[in-house]
Structures are given as C-alpha cells and as structure tokens.
Image (tube, grey):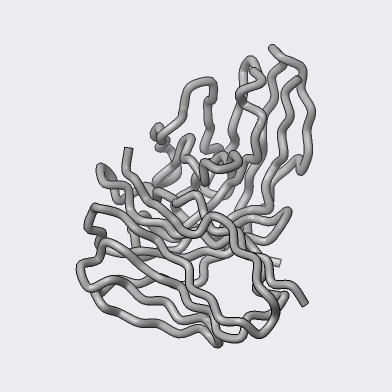
C-alpha cells in the first residue's frame, strides 16, 4: 500500500495564528494535490504542484512541494474560522496514474 | 450550478438489502470515480471509469458493482449490504485521467448498514 502520511492529525488554533501542516512519503511523486473538505461536503481542490521546490500561493495559503518531490507542506497565515476543515493531500497511485491516493488528512479547527 | 450530483444524501439499509447510489456530472468530464471515506482512513477508491463504456477496480472493490450508464452518469451498486459498508460515499469526476487534473467531488451519500 502506498503510504502517504499527514501530520498533525488534528490541530486546533486561535484566529490570527499561523500554522503548517505536512504531507510526507518515502516515495517520489510526479505531482501532488491539496484539497479542503468542509463538514457534510466533498473535498474541493486547492492546488496542484508538479515541480520539486515549487511554491504556490492562494491568498493566505502557501503550498510547497519538496525538492525531492516526496513531501509537501501547507502554511496558513493569520488563520480564520473559515479555514476550518479537513485538509487532504493526494498523489497519483504508484501503479496507475489514473488513480489518486489520498492521505487521511489534517482536521483543522480555527477558533474565533 | 455545474458540478457533481449524488443521490440520495442519506440512507439506512438492513444487512442483506441492496441499493444503488446515483451520480451525475454536467461538466462533460470523461472520467468518473467512486470513493468511500471512513474515519482515520482517508478516501479509498472503489471503482473508476476512465471514459464512457469502461470501468476498472480500485483499491476496495469487493462487495460493489458499477455502471457507467453514459458520459454523465456513474452508479454504484451494493448487492447485499454489510455493516462493513457503513461509510460516506463520494463520487468524483475529472476532465481526463492524469495526475495534474483535479477531481470535482459530489457532496456525498452517508450510508448506514444495520
């Protein structure tokens, strides 16, 4: 089984704080995606990174793909209650790029 | 609104009953997928359809069947439900198969088998 580890599993912070969550593996990936899932809804794509060392920004969210393309981080600046949700990373399945393999996610709660 | 529509949103079944989960997308996407989501285990692929007329097994296909009825619709059938199939089921679609194309997900079907 392709192992994709996300940490921390749970994170609860106050509004205005900064945070970083991680997605790690021992495998090399051609690309990596981040999704956010709100309660009662399906995941929504935030970003796709494809180049080692790549950094992408989406408002207060900064995504980085590791130089070796084995890991990724998501940094949120000045978190807001609207950032609350389950953050999932996903990579192409090792045996078939037709499938995405998802990590188990980081559940983020931002308290007002 | 364009997107992926799943029905029903909630369902309770007795062990041994059958049911079909419906999924339709109106984005003209070629590829469609069925995932299940369980606490602590993330999303696991059940079946997928690369294009109309084709279906393939994913990571956890046992106990399920699928039908790609046309380009828009992809259904998931449980022939004889078991408590282990209690889960939240998500349908997704993408324009083409390939790792750089994001998936669009439906809002899910919460299934309880008692």
Q: Which residue is drawn at 51% across and 81% down?
A: A61
- In the picture shown, does residue A3 fall above or below A56? above
Front residue of B94 and B84: B84
How far across and down, in percent of the image, does residue B45 sit? 46, 40
Front residue of B110 and A7: A7
Residue at the limit of the structure toward the top, as seen here: B16
Front residue of A41 and A20: A20
Q: Quadrant of the N terminus of chain B?
A: bottom right
How far across and down, in percent of the image, does residue B72 sit? 57, 49
Asked where in the image residue B76 lies, by quadrant, the reply is top right
Front residue of B63 and A60: A60
- In the picture shown, does residue B86 fall above or below B15? below
How far across and down, in percent of the image, does residue A58 sit? 51, 83
Left or right position of A84 against B74:
right
Asked where in the image residue A24 lies, by quadrant, the reply is bottom left
Q: Which residue is drawn at 45% across and 30% down?
A: B60
Left or right position of B110 against B95:
right
């Amino acid at each position: 089984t392709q192992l994709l580890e996300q940490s921390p599993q749970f994170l609860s912070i106050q509004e205005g704080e900064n945070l970083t969550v991680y997605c790690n593996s021992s495998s090399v990936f051609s690309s990596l995606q981040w999704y956010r899932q709100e309660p009662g809804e399906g995941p929504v794509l935030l970003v796709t990174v494809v180049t080692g060392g790549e950094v992408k920004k989406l408002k207060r969210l900064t995504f980085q793909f590791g130089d070796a393309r084995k890991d990724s981080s998501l940094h949120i600046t000045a978190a807001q209650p609207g950032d609350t949700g389950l953050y999932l990373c996903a990579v192409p399945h090792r045996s078939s790029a037709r499938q995405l393999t998802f990590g188990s996610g980081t559940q983020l709660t931002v308290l007002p | 609104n364009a997107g992926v529509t799943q029905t029903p949103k909630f369902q309770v079944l007795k062990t041994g009953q059958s049911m079909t989960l419906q999924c339709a997308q109106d984005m003209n996407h070629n590829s469609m997928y069925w995932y299940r989501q369980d606490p602590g285990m993330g999303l696991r692929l059940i079946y997928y359809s690369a294009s109309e007329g084709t279906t393939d097994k994913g990571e956890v296909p046992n106990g399920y069947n699928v039908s790609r009825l046309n380009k828009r619709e992809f259904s998931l059938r449980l022939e004889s439900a078991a408590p282990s199939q209690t889960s939240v089921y998500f349908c997704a679609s993408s324009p083409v198969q390939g790792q750089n194309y994001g998936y669009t997900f439906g809002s899910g079907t919460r299934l309880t088998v008692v």
